[in-house]
Image (cartoon, coloured by chain):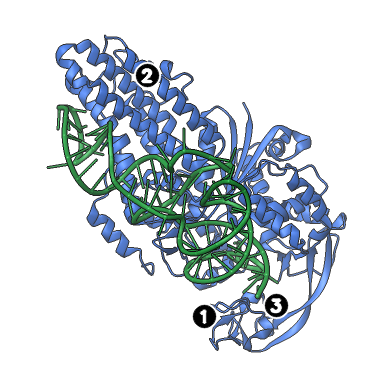
RNA sequence: GGGCCCGUAGCUCAAUGGUCAGAGCGGAGCGCUCAUAACGCUUUGGUUGCAGGUUCGAGUCCUGCCGGGCCUACCA
């Protein structure tokens, strides 16, 4: 049994995420976590909301709520959605937790003491009316490029030109609208990543089994030279940068930059979990500290490609620079983007399907199956309603759902609702078992390797093999001549349904559970040998014919959804 | 402007420089009748974006072009 630590990129707090966010990190991470648990490994699966930063403050202001209250509410919303999609986190934390405050300050202190942090002075807009420094995005004005009058200090949303706040014409505060701004000197802490670049590069070079996408992104940044990054901001919502014992002064009123404290939350969330369980510190430290038991942990991170630089460079820099034995990531599984009907999912334009809407329309399994079987692994992939309808109807309803239906109903009508007795296996059964052994082994290999789409393809082939077998064995014909033979076929087929439920659970946990419950074998474990597994339900074992596991999506529904989610979110 | 990625069948995607570029869906035909008009079998379908080049051999490597996207450019 291995100990596997899995983290999914943290969803940002400022609203409900769309399906693209789900497929790029949380969903494949969940698939892997469920699989590894099913194989008997000890799994720590961590996720959390990323709550700090300017966008959170802006979203809270827009909602007319204090930022802490807003974040608490949105965390609950996201936690419920995660449950809705059956994301099996060991703990779903919050980057604003006391545990994260403490750990972030601890690591910053260590970095400071080790000479990896220095104070630098820069010029920034100060709003007299608001009595505070304004981060780039809090400054608005007229775009010098296109004349748009609501350009933000970091970028003009109209012409998309990247801006420096000082370039704006007639700059004003986005908070109060005040134009009483002046450039003042302010101090910020900088993480001296450049001093750690050599160590980071050596570490990345030692990761020989990483995916090409991950390595090429990391190497590109290293090649250009790791820049020292400001890790503080002039905000009130966040982890205070001035604290007792800090090896610097003058950081009052400033907090750590969200990208400094967010990945630290992976660790802090594990601490939150231990506290919530009433466990002591060894419980979480044994997952993260190589000197306290984490040496044998295998740590895997899941994320979209946009997150790779932070996970290959910034976060390792934080941990390495602390000179404490934190367990660095062992493997990074990164994903490309999921597009929507020929364009991009867009949170700001309300384009695409959002997580709450998706669950209102259809159960989690439908989305899980489509998203995972089309995961953007090698390149960006695309969601279309037509493809979604076809895949779900064909794979889930026809191939898997109908297999269960035809087998259980045939049994009920001919033999009753118990596994029938009599008859023997012949050549067909031997051939089927051999095929399933081969395919199951391939499926397991792909799951181990986190080859999500290939695993889905193999799983579907395993489902299809059941229908092929039935067609050849034709129990409906055998029943007329030799009922015992028909009984043997159906006994195997019922056991095959059980096998499907077990091995499909990482993809479609609800349907798997429904099926196992109907078969009265909810504790069914992962199959060792296929031949043995196909005898798990003995003659006489009672079961119930389940309702159809999956319904089909009608053309009219698809058209309605297509229209409903084409533009602005209602 | 600079760096990078992608472009393969009607659709979604595969293919260590090496048989005839594959699979699922869709289309066509046949079969079966247990089942959610489901299932099975057979079959159709590609000038691998375009133009050159390297090679005994290119979807794969190189150059240019066209089209889409990302980073550069402190959204997260």
Mark whose residue sits in front, 2 or 1: 2
Please report, as a chain letter, where disc 2 is located: A
Task: Report how far apart the C-alphas of labels 3 and 2 lie in the structure.
Answer: 73 Å
Q: Are marks 3 and 2 on the same chain?
A: yes
- Few, some or many C-alpha atoms within 10 Å of disc 3 (few <14, some 14-19, many ≥20)? many
Circles 3 and 2, Cβ within 8 Å, touching? The answer is no
Q: Secondary structure at mark 3?
A: strand
How far across and down, in percent of the image, does residue A76 sit? Answer: 50, 54
Determine which residue is flagged by label 2.
Answer: A431
Is any part of residue A115 visible from this angle? Answer: yes
Mark whose residue sits in front, 3 or 2: 2
How far across and down, in percent of the image, does residue A431 sit? Answer: 37, 19
Chain displayed in green: B
Q: Is residue A161 above or below residue A254?
A: below
Determine which residue is flagged by label 3.
Answer: A133
Picture quadrant where residue A450 is located: top right
Determine which residue is flagged by label 1.
Answer: A158
């Amino acid at each position: 049994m291995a100990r596997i630590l899995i983290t999914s990129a943290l969803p940002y707090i400022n609203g409900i995420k769309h399906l693209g966010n789900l497929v790029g990190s949380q969903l494949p991470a969940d698939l892997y976590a469920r699989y590894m648990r099913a194989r008997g490994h000890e799994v720590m699966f961590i996720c959390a909301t990323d709550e700090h930063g300017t966008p959170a403050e802006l979203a809270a202001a827009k909602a007319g709520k204090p930022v802490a209250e807003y974040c608490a509410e949105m965390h609950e919303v996201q936690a419920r959605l995660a449950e809705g999609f059956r994301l099996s986190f060991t703990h779903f934390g919050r980057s604003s937790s006391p545990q994260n405050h403490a750990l972030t300050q601890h690591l910053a202190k260590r970095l400071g003491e080790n000479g990896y942090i220095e104070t630098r002075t820069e010029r920034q807009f100060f709003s007299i009316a608001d009595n505070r420094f304004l981060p780039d995005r809090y400054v608005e004005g007229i775009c010098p490029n296109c004349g748009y009058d609501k350009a933000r200090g970091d970028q003009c949303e109209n012409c998309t030109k990247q801006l420096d706040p000082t370039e704006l014409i007639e700059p004003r505060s986005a908070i109060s609208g005040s134009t009483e701004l002046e450039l003042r000197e302010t101090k910020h802490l900088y993480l001296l990543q450049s001093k750690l670049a050599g160590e980071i590069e050596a570490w990345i070079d030692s990761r020989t089994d990483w995916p090409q996408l991950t390595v090429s992104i990391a190497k590109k940044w290293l090649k250009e030279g790791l820049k020292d990054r400001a890790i503080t901001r002039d905000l009130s919502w966040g982890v205070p940068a001035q604290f007792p014992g800090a090896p610097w002064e003058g950081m009052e009123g400033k907090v750590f930059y969200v990208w400094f404290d967010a990945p630290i939350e992976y660790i802090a969330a594990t601490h939150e979990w231990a506290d919530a369980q009433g466990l002591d510190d060894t419980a979480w430290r044994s997952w993260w500290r190589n000197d306290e038991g984490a040496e044998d942990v295998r740590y895997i991170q899941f994320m979209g490609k946009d997150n790779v630089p932070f996970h290959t460079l910034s976060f390792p820099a934080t941990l390495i620079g602390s000179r404490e034995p934190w367990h660095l990531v062992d493997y990074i599984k990164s994903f490309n983007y999921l597009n929507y009907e020929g364009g991009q999912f867009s949170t700001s334009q309300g384009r695409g399907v959002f997580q709450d809407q998706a669950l209102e329309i259809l159960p989690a399994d439908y989305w899980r199956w489509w998203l995972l079987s089309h995961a953007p692994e090698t390149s960006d992939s695309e969601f279309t309603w037509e493809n979604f309808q076809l895949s779900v109807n064909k794979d889930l309803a026809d191939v898997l759902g109908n297999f269960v239906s035809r087998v259980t109903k045939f049994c009920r009508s001919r033999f009753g609702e118990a596994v029938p007795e009599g008859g023997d296996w012949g050549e067909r059964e031997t051939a089927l078992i051999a095929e399933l052994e081969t395919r199951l082994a391939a499926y397991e290999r792909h799951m181990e390797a986190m080859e999500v789409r290939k695993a889905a393809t193999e799983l579907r082939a395993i489902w299809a093999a059941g229908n092929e077998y039935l067609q050849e064995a034709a129990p409906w014909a055998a029943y007329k001549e030799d009922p015992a033979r028909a009984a043997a076929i159906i006994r195997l087929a019922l056991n095959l349904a059980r096998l499907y439920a077990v091995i499909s659970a990482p993809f479609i946990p609800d349907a798997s559970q429904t099926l196992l419950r109907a078969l009265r074998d909810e504790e069914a474990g992962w199959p060792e040998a296929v031949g043995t597994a196909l005898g798990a339900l003995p003659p006489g074992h009672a079961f119930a014919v389940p309702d159809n596991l999956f319904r089909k999506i009608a053309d009219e529904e698809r058209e309605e959804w297509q229209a409903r989610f084409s533009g602005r979110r209602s």
